[in-house]
Every structure is written in C-alpha cells, then in structure tokens.
Image: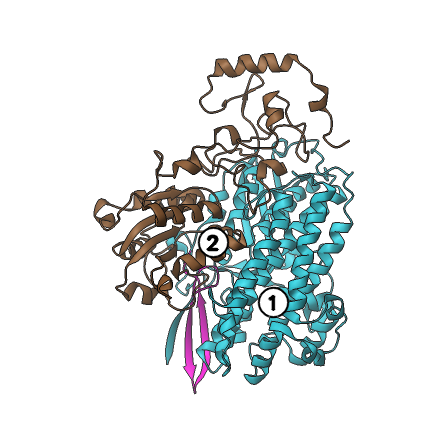
C-alpha cells in the first residue's frame, strides 16, 4: 500500500495539439503501460482521468513530480484557451509546483506543425515560452521528447529513468542522448540497398532505399525508430514510407515526399559524411550491378 | 438561469452554455474556443505535403484525413481527364487501414469517454469502469493498443503515417503480414464477443429486432440497463435526419430526411460562419460564439456518424432500434458499438480480398505540378461521421484547402433561428449531467472541430 502512496505524481497538460501524442502513448505496449500506471500516479490527463478537472488541479497546492506538456504554447487567448485561461498561464501556474518538465512531442518542444499557423505569431515550444523565473522550481533542465508524434517508449523510458536516476543526459536540443544519438536510418531493413546505392524504383515496393527519390530523411534524423519499433511491430521506412524527419527542429519542411537532388545525387548527404566521401563511395558502388539487389526479395 | 460548464475528455474541451427554464434546458450553446488554423497552414504549401499535414489535424482520426486528402488529390487528376489507375489491392489497404483506426476509436470511446460517465447514473457500483484504475478501462486500452498494431503493419506506425499517396499506397505487405493483421482482428473480435456484447459475433450480426437488446450480455448490457433505468431511449433526440457523404467498400452514401435517398451531391454542402469567429477580427459577426463553423446539406442540419451509416445502409438491428427509439442517446450509443462489430467482420472480409500479386502503387503518368490549376473534392466516412475535403491548387502550391469534419456537422452552431443537430438533442434535458452525456454520444472530437 505504501508503494501506492509514494508513486511520483504526473500531470499531463494539453496545449495546442492534435492529441497525437496522447494516442501514441495509449498505443504503448500493454504491459509497459500497465507497469507505468502502477509505478506513477497519473493525477490529471484531460483525455483520460476523471477525478479532477483542470480548474480544480490549478487550485490544489499539492506538488507535481513530472509535468508533461503535449502541444505548443501561446499567450493568445482569442485563438486558444483552456479552462478560461491561456495555455501560457496554465503552464506557468502548474510549473511553479513541478520538479520536472517534459515536452511531449515536437509541438511542445519547439512549436512543430502548429507554429506554421502564422496568423498567430505567438506559438512557441516550452523553452521559448518560459523565462528563467518560471522554471525556478525545476530540479532538472527541460527534457524535449521530439517526434510527431513521440514514440510511447521514449516517454516511458524517460520517466522511468528520471524516477530511478533523477537525471538524464541531454543533447544540445534538450533531448535524451540515449534516444536521439541514433539515426532513424539505424536498423532500417532497407539498409543493404543504401549500402549499394540501389534506389526504390517507386513507392509501394519492399525493395530499394527511399533516400534517393522518395525524400527519406533517415540518414540525417535523430531518432531510434528502427531500433525501438513503432507499435512493437514496424517503422515507416520498413513499411515503405520515407522518414520525414519529424524529430528534428526543421520539421515540417517543404516537399517532404521527394528528394532534392544535385546532378543526380541527393542534395543533402548522410549526417557527418563529407560530400566528397559520399560521392566517391556512390561512384564505386554504382559501378557494380548486383542482380540480387535489383530483383524482388520474394520471387 | 444560466450555467456554464467545461467538458473535458472530448479530444480537447468545449464549453456548454445552458439557459434553464422550469428545470429544463431551454437553450444551449456549444462553444469550441480553440483554433489551430490548419486551412491557413496548408495555404501555399507544396501540394503533396498535404499528405503529411492533414493527418496531423487529428491524433485519433488522422488516417481519415489522409484518405480524404489522397482522394481529393486523385479527384484533381480525374477533373483533368487523367483519372489515376489505383489497384484493388491499394484500395483495400487504404480502407482496411481506415477501418482499423475506426475500430480503435470506437473501443476507446465506449470505455474511456462514455462508460465512466454513464455509470454515474446507476445506483450500483461499477468500479470496474473507472478511468485509469478499473479492470475494464485497462482491458479496453490494452485491446485498442493491440488492434492498432494491425494498422502499423500496413502504414509503418500509428498515429501519423502518410502511407496513402495518389496512385496507391507506399507499402507492400506480405501474406504473413496479412495473416498477422487478421490475427489482430480476431483478437479484437474475441474481446467484442467476450467482453462487449457477450455473444458470438456471428450471432450478434443476425440480430434484427429491437427487443434483441435484451439478448445482449457483456458490458453493453450494463449500458443498456442504465439507459432504461434513466430513460436514455427518450432523450438526446434531434431532427432524426441522417447523412452519409462517403461511399466505400464498407459504407453507402445517402441521406434520410423522412425518406431514404441514396444519392449525394457535393453541391448541396454549405459551410456558414454566421455564428463563428473569424481569424480576421473585423469579419467576425457580432453573434459569433465558437470557432466551429456550421455545415448544412440542402439547407438542413443532419446528423452524421455510425447511426447515420447504419440507417442509410439499412443494417437490421440498428435500423429496428432506430425505428423504435428514434435518434435517441441510446440508439446513438448502440449504433457505434454495433458498427464496431460490423467493421471487425467487414474488415476481415476485406483483408481476404487482397491479391498480394497486384501492385501497391502505380506511378501517375503526370505529376500534379503539371496542372497549372486544379480543384478536387472528397468525402470519407471517419470514426465520427462524414469528413469532407476540398482543395484548389495552382502551380504546385495549395491555393485553398477546406475541411468539414464530422463534429462540425453534429456540433457546429445553429444558424438563422435553426438549431444545430446537437443543440436540438440537448434542449429539453433536465440535468447538466445528461446534457453532457448526450454531447458525448456524438463522440465529440474537439481538435477536429476547429482544426
């Protein structure tokens, strides 16, 4: 019973969002989600909990261990309000009693898709929306879990890590290093095609790499989507959909489903590889025509 | 007397502003006060990027938006007499994906958004339904998460994949993938049989008489019992007009306004902003109170969603319940749970129809950028009802994008002295708790409403 009382308290706030991160989280591995619910006290989530309304939560003095925010923040009340207040006001009030602040998804991290709504010039990620004085109660830098949506396992691993070790190593963008040091490319089942520079002849095929024509950002996108699979079973690039780089701060970019090229070579080369190295290797790889890689996998 | 209540757990929130007279709600305004401006975001974007943007209108029904975008883009080809060839396999994979998303949504709706509130109307203790802690809540979240894996097998992940593109789909599942998808459906069918309706799906699908409601067991029986104890079969009634804009392998288009007509003309769709805020404040009318617009078909308000689909398609069981209890809250809730069973059965059939030797994708002979100008429309049946997309393109950029979501049909503001479907359903109710449950019976999606 004591165990129940000591569970860290979580509040999940929804700001300007599509709720995609909530549904991603609900789609977590069932046993993992149950363990989460047994290990933490989800005090408030606007789509899930029923015990308390946001208004009542704001009145309460009780401390919050983890404040999770899904969605971008604005101080514009005409476009966006929750419980009669701006998302900025609600965030700041909750933050005063919180120990950790975690941005759930790209919108909370840096504005994401919603920041593209230019008629409201005040749509921000958490870091941008907050001043030093607002985060005085935090005992850890803001954690940005980018992704559109964020992978449920990234949320769970981050929370369990912070519960256990009290801190987590972050990269320059405030993202947990152990998740975002990998590239989406790592573990993609199409890697052999990438190695030998065999492009996918079109969409809708099991064969070929999507980097050359279809716009895949796997080799330059920080995420472990092909290491920790989605919904336990798959990833976009494995299925045949190019990575659109949704964990990076420049998402959403333009022309996401095609590769911008210079003299037949992708304009942007894999992260940290010099253009010269990439061109040389490509030149060599292309001199070989490997039958197996140009045939159907399953014949 | 006037009351203002904030309703949560509807994919965002809404405000219910009620006027009371003699202990009954005499007028109601449903306010959606959040606006995200997707139609503005889409303007001037490269045309195909819409495939990435529109699923992100909604975290729970993104695949419906994706399918609507794809079909609207394909409509542009058609309007240029360049109709795209899309294989049967691609069509099936699109519809199966959408159906799985609807199945997932209906499970969550019943257990997370309806039952925790409905049980409060009973004197019995129903702790099993309590949110987060209750056994049934947990079981439902578990089966929803399992079911959606089937969609990830086709689309790579859920939410937010863009696996449908003009010309087909990006993926090429193996026969083993299809078997796994079948397995996930079977798992959900087991849940439907054992937990939700308490009888075999095959048996369930033969029910045709409203009195068969009493044959049901399982969790739906709990709802039915609570309903008859509280006269849910008599509240929540609206115009009893039904609208299905989308045509598919699973649903038929049509409308019921006293009589059933299986013909839909997009020309009859009208979107009004009489009572809606405008991004340009100067253009906002003085009567505006919500960001939701108003959607009318042939100048009338209609209900859209599972009840409309069952009635237009004349599915026996729901049609007979509807005949007896009209468009009451009870009928609306049963219709959604019924559709869950129907879609599980239907989707399994569709999976079987896939010929894996067909192409997943046929590259369009010309690219959309080659059309100087184009216009396209589409209507899709989404979890909550008919979803309409319309776009205009010019020089490979989006000139204008218009989205009318199911919740706009059901919950947009009334105009010109005419009440909207949900307003009419709520007026006359004698408690705010009932009014909120009526609102929930439409399966409100706040984020979609004001996109």
Q: Chain A is drawn in which colour?
A: brown
Across and down, in percent, residue B234 comes to 58, 82
Q: Quadrant of the C terminus of chain A?
A: top right
Residue segment shown in magenta: B8-34
Q: Chain B is drawn in which colour?
A: cyan
Q: Nearer the viewer, residue A177 or A59?
A: A177
* Residue B308 visible to the viewer: no
Which residue is denoted by mark 1 in the rendering? B302
What's the CA distance linking mark 2 and mark 1? 30 Å
Give above or below for B45 relative to A289.
below
Give above or below for A231 relative to B257.
above
Q: Residue A22 carries which label?
A: 2
Across and down, in percent, residue A34 comes to 49, 57
Q: Which of A277 and A76 is in front in this view?
A: A277
- At 62% across and 76% down in the image, what residue appears? B221
Protein chain holding label 1: B
- At 43% across and 36% down in the image, what residue appears? A180
- At 74% across and 78% down in the image, what residue appears? B209
């Amino acid at each position: 019973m004591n165990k129940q009382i000591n569970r860290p308290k979580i509040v999940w706030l929804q700001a300007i969002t599509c709720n995609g991160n909530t549904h991603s989280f609900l789609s977590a591995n069932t046993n993992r989600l149950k363990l989460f619910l047994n290990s933490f006290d989800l005090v408030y989530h606007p789509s899930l909990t029923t015990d308390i309304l946001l208004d009542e939560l704001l009145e309460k003095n009780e401390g919050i261990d983890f404040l999770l925010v899904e969605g971008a923040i604005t101080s514009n009340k005409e476009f966006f309000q929750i419980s009669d207040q701006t998302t900025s006001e609600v965030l700041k009030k909750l933050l005063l009693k919180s120990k950790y602040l975690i941005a759930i998804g790209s919108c909370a991290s840096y504005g994401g898709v919603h920041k593209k709504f230019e008629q409201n010039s005040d749509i921000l990620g958490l870091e941008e929306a907050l001043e030093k004085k607002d985060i005085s109660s935090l005992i850890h830098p803001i954690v940005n879990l980018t992704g559109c949506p964020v992978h449920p396992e990234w949320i769970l691993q981050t929370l369990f890590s912070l519960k256990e070790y009290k801190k987590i190593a972050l990269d320059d963008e405030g993202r947990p290093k152990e998740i975002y040091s990998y590239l989406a490319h790592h573990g993609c089942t199409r890697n052999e095609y990438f190695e030998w520079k065999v492009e996918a002849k079109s969409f809708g095929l099991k064969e070929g790499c999507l980097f050359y024509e279809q716009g895949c950002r796997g080799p330059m996108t920080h995420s472990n989507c092909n290491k920790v699979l989605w919904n336990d079973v798959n990833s976009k690039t494995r299925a045949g959909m190019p990575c659109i780089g949704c964990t990076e701060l420049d998402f959403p970019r333009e022309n996401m489903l095609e590769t911008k090229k210079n003299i037949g070579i992708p304009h942007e080369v894999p992260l940290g590889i010099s253009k010269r190295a990439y061109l040389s290797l490509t030149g060599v790889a292309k001199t070989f025509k490997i039958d197996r890689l140009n045939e159907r996998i399953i014949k | 007397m006037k009351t203002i209540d904030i309703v949560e757990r509807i994919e965002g929130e809404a405000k219910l502003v009620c006027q009371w007279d003699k202990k009954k709600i005499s007028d109601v305004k449903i306010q959606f006060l959040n606006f995200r401006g997707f139609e503005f975001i889409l303007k001037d974007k490269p045309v195909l990027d819409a495939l990435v943007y529109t699923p992100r209108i909604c975290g729970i029904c993104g695949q419906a938006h994706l399918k609507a975008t794809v079909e609207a883009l394909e409509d542009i080809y058609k309007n240029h007499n360049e109709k795209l060839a899309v294989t049967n396999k691609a069509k099936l994979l699109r519809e199966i994906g959408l159906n799985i998303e609807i199945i997932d949504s209906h499970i969550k709706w019943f257990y997370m958004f309806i039952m925790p509130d409905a049980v409060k109307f009973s004197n019995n203790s129903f702790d099993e339904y309590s949110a987060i802690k209750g056994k049934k809540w947990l079981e439902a979240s578990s089966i929803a998460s399992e079911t959606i894996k089937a969609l990830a097998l086709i689309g790579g992940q859920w939410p937010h994949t863009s696996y449908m593109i003009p010309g087909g789909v990006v993926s090429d599942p193996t026969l083993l993938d299809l078997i796994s998808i079948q397995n996930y459906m079977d798992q959900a069918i087991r849940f439907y049989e054992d937990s939700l309706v308490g009888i075999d799906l095959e048996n369930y699908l033969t029910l045709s008489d409203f009195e068969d409601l009493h044959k049901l067991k399982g969790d739906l029986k709990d709802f039915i019992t609570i309903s008859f104890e509280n006269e849910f079969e008599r509240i929540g009634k609206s115009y009893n007009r039904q609208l299905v804009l989308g045509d598919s392998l699973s649903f038929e288009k049509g409308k019921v306004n006293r009589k059933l007509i299986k013909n839909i003309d997009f020309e009859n769709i009208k979107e009004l902003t009489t009572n809606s805020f405008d991004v340009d404040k100067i253009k906002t009318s003085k009567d505006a109170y919500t960001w939701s617009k108003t959607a009318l078909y042939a100048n009338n308000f209609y209900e859209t969603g599972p009840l409309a689909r069952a009635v237009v398609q004349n599915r026996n069981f729901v049609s007979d319940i509807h005949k007896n209890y009209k468009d009451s809250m009870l009928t609306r809730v049963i219709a959604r749970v019924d559709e869950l069973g129907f879609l599980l059965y239907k989707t399994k059939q569709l999976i079987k129809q896939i010929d894996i030797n067909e192409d997943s994708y046929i590259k369009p002979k010309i690219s959309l950028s080659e059309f100087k100008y184009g216009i396209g429309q589409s209507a899709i049946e989404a979890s909550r009802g008919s979803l309409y997309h319309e776009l205009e393109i010019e020089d490979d950029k989006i000139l204008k994008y218009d989205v009318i979501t199911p919740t706009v049909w059901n919950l947009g503001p009334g105009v010109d002295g005419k009440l909207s479907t949900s307003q009419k359903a709520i007026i006359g109710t004698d408690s705010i708790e009932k009014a909120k449950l009526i609102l929930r019976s439409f399966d409100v999606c706040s984020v979609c409403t004001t996109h």
